[in-house]
């Protein structure tokens, strides 16, 4: 049975990178760039003023001095005049530095004179000047393939007039729930039924990372229903099933995967929750068969499926960031010798993370998952973790609570 890291590595080594598509830059945020983009010109394109002020010759201003103001250059303007000894040109932020000038004196450091300006302090060569190409030189790579496009990247690409960019395609991920006890939300709920909540939780999890969910509904606990639904799921880029993945009398997922020629790479992982998690591949498409307990489904999605989908979408950073947290409560494993993901709350005080148990860790208890901020990773080789000890945690949300003083 693979360990958590072995399982995650095996998954990552097998899932494919999807194809590419061109998208409008306005729709590209959150996507992964599929091309290297280099600068078609220097940035800034011309040497310009960083302040509203006066363009001067620094050698004229080695001590407090008065200069004749011979022109005015607004942003978007220019001047054909040259700053000769004893003169200055009034200039606005972003306007091209006129010839002869080698520095700008901000208005605040002058008497703001119209015809003659008095400069109070000595001026250094290059002061308040933004030089052509000082940000980016022509030909330099501005955003590289594999980059997650955030607002700064979008702004940079837009500043070079890139109206369209190539990004990796979003995976279409089929979601299949299995079990005779399930009904869809909105259907009549008799006493012996439960609502298929896993499908909706998985839809939400997929949307959160920018993947496209394809909801297949419920496979009944029989071969024929599984064959039909799993075959349908294999048309998507990836398939996630929940429940029916153990070896019980009514567990058909693994049998049917076999029957459909889907090759199982593992059918157990040394983790809790999530031990029966199965990973299989057919024709380059991954199938993730997750246990049905909603807590197990969500944790195995988070820890094993999400990195894989991120890789398929072109992300180069797919591994969850790990933080050290100081335990505020004891954490104890129920099953010894296994990597245990425990649901914890996180507090931040004086720049440190503190973790405390979010409640009952039974996989049947969904409430403690709802309350949890993070998963604490309790390694195989230890079973009791005392308050004060440091554990690794994976945050479940990109947002954290405001620090209370
Ligand atoms: P199984 O893996 O089929 O034994 O299911 C484990 C537990 O998860 C059972 O209590 C199921 O009722 C529950 N479960 C299975 N599928 C879902 C689902 N789609 N939504 C909510 N609970 C589920
Ligand atoms: Mg079942």
Image (spheres, grey):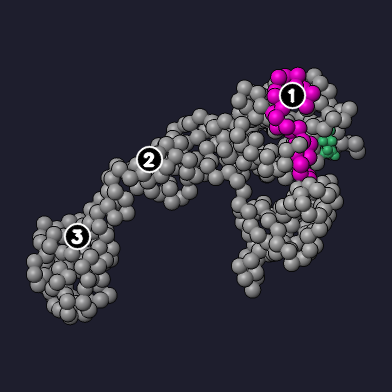
Picture coordinates of residue 28, whole percent (x, y)? 47, 41
Looking at the figure, which quarter contains the C terminus? Answer: bottom right
Q: Is residue 380 above or below residue 8?
A: below
Residue at image point 27% right, 75% down: 108
Quadrant in the picture for residue 230: top right
The disc placed on residue 194 is: none
Q: For mark 2, does the 10 Å Cα neighbourhood hold few (<14), some (14 to 19), or many (20 or more) residues?
A: some
- Real-space Cα distance between discs 2 and 1? 42 Å
Earlier in the chain: of badge 2 and badge 3, it is 2
Question: Which region shows up in magenta?
Answer: 254-280
Residue 198 makes an appearance in the image: no
Q: Nearer the viewer, residue 146 or 78?
A: 146
Q: Of the residues tagged 3 and 1, which is closer to the observer? A: 1
Q: Secondary structure at mark 3?
A: loop
Q: Secondary structure at mark 1?
A: helix
How many numbered marks are there? Answer: 3
Q: Residue at x 20, y 68 (%)?
A: 125
Residue at image mark 2? 37
Tell me which numbered mark, 2 or 1, is placed earlier along the sequence: 2
Horizontally, residue 102 falls left or right of residue 329, namely: left
Q: Ligand 1, what quadrant? A: top right
Does the image show residue 114? Answer: yes
Residue placed under numbered mark 3 in the picture: 97
Residue 257, which numbered label? 1
Asked whether 329 or 244 is in front, the reply is 329
Pick out the residue farthest to the left: 85
Residue 8 pos. (x, y %): 66, 40
- Residue at the location (62% across, 41% down)? 307
In the visual, does 135 lie left or right of 185? Answer: left
- Percent across and percent down for residue 262 are 70, 23
Kindly tell me whether mark 2's CB lies below 8 Å from ligand 1: no
**Is residue 242 depicted above or below 97 in this figure?**
above
């Amino acid at each position: 049975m693979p360990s958590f890291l072995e399982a995650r590595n095996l998954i990552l080594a097998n899932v494919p990178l999807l194809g590419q598509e061109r998208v409008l830059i306005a729709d590209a945020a959150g996507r992964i760039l599929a091309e290297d983009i280099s600068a078609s010109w220097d940035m800034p394109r011309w040497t310009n003023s960083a302040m509203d002020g006066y363009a001067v010759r620094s050698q004229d201003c080695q001590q407090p001095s008065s200069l004749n103001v011979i022109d005015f250059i607004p942003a978007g303007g220019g001047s054909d005049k040259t700053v000769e000894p004893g003169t200055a040109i009034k200039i606005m932020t972003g306007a091209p530095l006129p010839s002869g000038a080698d520095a700008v004196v901000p208005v605040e450091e002058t008497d703001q004179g119209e015809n003659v300006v008095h400069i109070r302090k000595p001026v250094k060569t290059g002061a308040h000047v933004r030089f052509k190409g000082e940000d980016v030189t022509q030909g330099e790579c501005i955003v590289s393939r594999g980059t997650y496009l955030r607002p700064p990247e979008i702004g940079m690409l837009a500043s070079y007039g890139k109206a369209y960019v190539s990004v990796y395609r979003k995976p279409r991920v089929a979601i299949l729930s299995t079990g005779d006890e399930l009904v869809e939300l909105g259907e009549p709920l008799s006493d012996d039924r439960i609502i298929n909540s896993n499908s909706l939780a998985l839809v939400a999890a997929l949307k959160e990372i920018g993947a496209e969910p394809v909801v297949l509904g419920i496979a009944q606990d029989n071969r024929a229903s599984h064959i039909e639904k799993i075959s349908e799921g294999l048309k998507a880029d990836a398939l996630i099933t929940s429940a029916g993945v153990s070896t019980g009398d009514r567990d058909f997922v693994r049998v049917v995967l076999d029957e459909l020629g889907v090759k199982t790479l593992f059918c157990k992982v040394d983790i809790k929750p999530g031990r029966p998690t199965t990973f299989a591949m057919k024709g380059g498409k991954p199938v993730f068969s997750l246990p049905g307990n909603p807590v197990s489904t969500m944790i195995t999605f988070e820890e094993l499926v999400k990195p894989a989908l991120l890789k398929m979408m072109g992300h180069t950073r797919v591994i969850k960031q790990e933080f050290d947290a100081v335990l505020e409560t004891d954490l104890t494993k129920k099953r010894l010798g296994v990597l245990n993901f425990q649901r914890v709350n996180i507090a931040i005080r004086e720049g440190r993370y503190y973790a405390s148990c979010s409640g009952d860790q039974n996989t049947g208890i969904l409430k403690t998952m709802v309350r949890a901020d993070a998963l604490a990773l309790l390694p195989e080789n230890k079973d009791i973790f005392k308050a004060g000890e440091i554990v690794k945690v994976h945050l479940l949300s990109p947002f954290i609570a405001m620090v209370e003083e």
